[in-house]
Amino acid sequence: MAYNPLVSIVVPAHNAEVTLTRALDCLLDQETADWEVIIVDDASTDRTPAIIAAYVEQDARFRTLSSCAKSPAGARNNGISAARGHWLMFLDADDWVDASFLTKMLAALETASDAVAAYCGSRRVMPDGVLTPASIAPEVASQPFETFARRCAIATHALLIDRATVVELGGFDVSLSTCEGWDLWQRVARLGKNWVMVDEPLAFYRTSPNALTRNSRQTLADAEIIIARGFATDPRVKHPAPAHANGTISVGGRTASEALAWFALWNAASDCGSGGGSIKPQSLRALPAGRKWAREIAKVTFDGLMVGSLSVPAHMAARWDMFGGAITELIIELGKVWGDPVAGRRLQYHLEQMLLDADDLAAPRRLARTFGIRVDARNPTSTELPEGIDQIYAYLMMDGQIGAIVQFGVLGKVTGRHWIELILNFLPQKDDGADTSSTLAADALSTTAERRPDPDSHFGKLAQLISEARELVRSSAEATQPHPAPRRAPASSGHNKDRTSFWNQYFATEDPWNYSSPYEQEKYDRQLEILPAGPIGRALELACAEGHFTRQLAPRVGQLTATDISAVAIERARARCSDHPNVEFGVLDFFADTLPSEMDLIVCSEVLYYLDDIAVLRRIAKNFVEALAPGGSFINAHAFVLRDNIEMTGFDWNTFGAQTISKTLSETEGIVLAQSIQTELYRIDRFRRLSPDHMATEPVIDHVPVRAPIGIGVARNIVWGGARVLRRDVVRSERRQRIPVLMYHSVADEGPAALARFRLTPAAFASQMAWLRANGFHALMSEQLEWFIANHEPFAGRPVLITFDDGFQNFADHAWPILRAHDLTAEVFLVTDLVGESAKWDAVSGPPTRLMDAGTVRRLAAEGAFFGSHLATHRAIDGLSSSELAAELLRSRMFVERWTGRPTRAFAAPFSVTDRRLGRLAKECGYRIGFGGRHGPADLNSDAIDLPRIEIRGDRSLDDFVATVEAVLG
């Protein structure tokens, strides 16, 4: 009986005298011995047959066949027909595998009894013997058919595959000149069986300038056939898995044409690397142009260049002159095919980044847009920019060692002063006296700081852009309007030290509490409603303010004395009530002064909060009783305050409120509660002074809703449903190292379905803001955040920075009223060239959302909203030239400053896309705070010019929001 080995290894060989020995020796080195080798001599005319014969004679496990197929597919099929092992391996005559290859692959297969194949990683071997980085495709293990339907993800000799399955499927397709392995793996994967990954580079693939697969036209033609088969039925596979019977599907728009375009891109890049250029850009039309694909496209391009130029990554930048012109032209043409030159430039930047990241800059590297250079940090000299260069990638060298790697956008020549600034920023300076470079650099910088910059230098070009931006803003056709007045800080809480001065200062602005609002009038009506029945002779109104209620009370009483501590308020009240002869006015501080006596009615509303403590309230309450005539009434209206009962709706004031006031008055000897009107926000009580012939009775208590609309000045102080903690308490007790910076976009009930992630309903947004308010959060602005980071000062309490990108009109319509109602504010980043227009960048997803106009920005800034830059056009910055980027940073900042009347120091990168140029260029354009693409909380160690944020999605629940924010609190 013939012996059946565990593994059969098929080695096709055609004129392989140079490489065959290396390939066969790696098999003799295998740790596992249970194998056979079938060497198929495919019509060789060199010493290949003699080499084969020597191995067959030396080891019985080697067998040989002759073939006239003159193709790897046919030769392999001949070998398959003679194979006896359970598993097949295909090793080309110029490749090899690690000595542990069979051991590790078979071990992986033993752990997965249902596996049809095992595969491993691989490395290319360049003609000079240098190895490329390892490559492996994890997606083959999870989605083998979906992967092979689109691309060939593994090297031919990087797998063991079930022989019976290969035989059943008919082996390799001899009609294909190339890619025959890919075609077979696709058919095997269509069966739906398991593939096992061995995550090690055990296979080595020799790259040769004469390789058959370097015929890009033929390779692309064969790939088109294989991809088409992957997206359709394949009659060669008799028993496909049901899910794959009709081929793969175009998930997420990833069509067969896109798959072919990716393959064409690799071939085009390979051709550029080898000095060719046979692939036309039109074959790449189906490549996705979106910015999220730029890095992946650059990676495929990089790999194709590597193979085409026969270079490992570390050598590719040095060989730019061989392929740089061709690949740059291909990328430019690709941008034209996409109709988006910015997307092409983004790809160029990504590719050049990868090339220089792998290089040692042993010599200057001039690429298309990037200049790689080493700079002596002790003696920096001016660097002239080659034409087209707008980015520097530099090693700052100290004593022959790399002290720092810097990358930045440039507009012109980099002067010695410019290099000194970079050295001071990026290299640590010694302070032990042994190194004077810091002092020397600082001296050099100070002597040149006041000079006008060279007009051809970076800073000279920047100065020109600044001048152009200023002129553009100055000459804007938009009508100039006065800037909003700065918002006055709240009056000092030190009124107890000099009450008269405090209240006179408070009444410096007329109608400070919006007395004529529907909300205040409803309270006035209810105070009139609670007046005692019958005639009221003598009445006293304490804290009458500007006489709004005085005027309404006067007709209901015989004689009214209206008093206030503020002479300013009294004069306005006297003027308002001049047509009421039964009213006399006077200045009176009822906290300290004696009250007139024998009053039938005393009204004292919205003022007892200002007493120092409950002991003072008790004393004042006795004064009220003594000032009343027997049977007289005391009426007061006061709001519920959280300090009394944190679990109920109330105003977040640092004082006691209606609950404590009512309780204290009820405990005061000589008066009893007769009637009370109570709402969720306030209560109005009428107390009656007992007389000898009157007995106390049960009070009449009415619960009524607040029907009047509540103005923002009132609403911002209300915490509906109560609070878990109070702001002032956590400010005193909590210190933290990090805070949440929340990122929103749109607040609206409707919009394109594709943008649902970026849109919250007003109700959902309101629930989030209510939660923040009830849990003691207060709003912080970006400039404050920058201060905390710069000073490494722990945050007090629970700060939150709420940001909105884009500047949609629905921020003004929905989000801003909600924020104000919860005593919060936000920072909105505006796309300044499009203010007053619509979000054109979202047009592909549906009707673009309208953006706020300049007038709305002015109004909201005056009301307390803050604004920053979202640049000028909303283009992702990684595709802008350095000059375009600087121009957008400058003019967007200047327009925001014009509209708000305040300095603008913060920006948020459109699409949250950044690159290594942005931070430094933004600082040079006047910014101090930036928000990029990183996700998470901002902490005291954050880089202020590249701060993270937490995206708040519209497709998440309130519970998700709470969990996200609480995770930051820790």
Image (cartoon, helix red, strand yellow):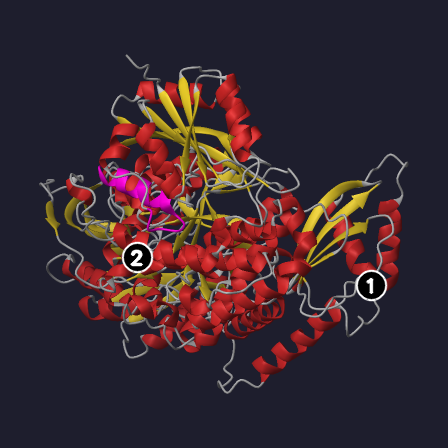
- Quick check: is 440 in the magenta stretch? no
* One can see residue 384 in this view: yes
Q: For the residue labelled by badge 2, is the local secondary structure a helix, a strand or a loop? A: helix
Q: Position of residue 754 (x, y in %)?
A: 27, 60
Question: Would you say the residues marked 1 and 2 are in contact, meaning their CB atoms lie under 8 Å apart?
Answer: no
Q: Is residue 600 left or right of residue 158?
A: left
**Closer-to-camera residue (612/644):** 644
* One can see residue 543 in this view: no
Three-letter amino acid code at disc 2?
Ala
Q: Position of residue 680 (x, y in %)?
A: 20, 49
Where residue 928 sits, quadrant-wise, is bottom right
Task: Work out whether 639 lies above or below 814.
Answer: above
Q: Which mark is residue 449?
A: 1
Q: Residues within 10 Å of mark 2 (few under 14, many from 20)?
A: many
Q: CA distance from mark 1 to mark 2?
A: 59 Å
Q: Of helix, strand and loop, which mostly describes the magenta segment? A: helix
Q: Is residue 407 left or right of residue 207?
A: right
**Closer-to-camera residue (480/657):** 480
**Quadrant occupied by the C terminus:** top left
**Quadrant occupied by the N terminus:** top left
Three-letter amino acid code at disc 1?
Ala
* Residue visible at 69% across and 68% down in the picture: 411
Q: Is residue 6 left or right of residue 310?
A: left
Where residue 350 sits, quadrant-wise, is bottom right
The residue under label 2 is 256
**Closer-to-camera residue (784/541):** 784
Which range of residues does the magenta coloring cover? 174-191
Q: Earlier in the sequence, mark 1 or mark 2?
A: 2
